[in-house]
Amino acid sequence: MDTLAETLSVRLAKWQPDVAELARQFILEIIDLADRDALDILRSRSVEQEVLDLLDEY
């Protein structure tokens, strides 16, 4: 099994059930976007934070 999959499996078992379920939902969304070659349209957190920081300056 891939290292990422192994790590995810271990972490999902350790996290609180609601956190694990939310992580599963996010991961399924990412897989769906990757399947549709649409990951490049997803904004990263760093870009989003830059925009928020710029808005705070004004």
Image (cartoon, rainbow, N blue to C red):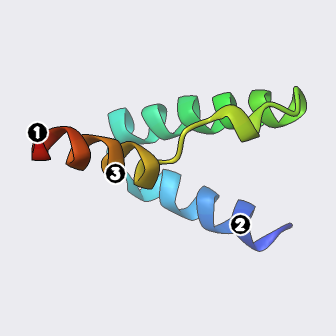
| Residue at the bottom extreme, as displayed | 3
Between residues 58 and 27, which one lies in front from this camera angle? Answer: 58
Tag on residue 58?
1
| Residue at the front extreme, as displayed | 58
Classed neighbour count for the residue bearing mark 3: other residues with Cα under 10 Å, few (<14), some (14–19), many (≥20): few
Between residues 1 and 23, which one lies in front from this camera angle? Answer: 23
N-terminal label among 2 and 3: 2
Q: Does 33 sit left or right of 42 as displayed?
A: right
Q: Secondary structure at mark 2?
A: helix
Q: Which kind of residue does numbered mark 1 sit on?
A: Tyr
x and y percent of residue 3 in the render? 75, 73
x and y percent of residue 50 in the render? 34, 51
N-terminal label among 1 and 2: 2
Q: Which kind of residue does numbered mark 2 sit on?
A: Leu
Residue placed under numbered mark 3 in the picture: 50
Q: CA distance from mark 2 to mark 3?
A: 28 Å
The residue positioned 88% from the left and 26% from the top of the image is 36
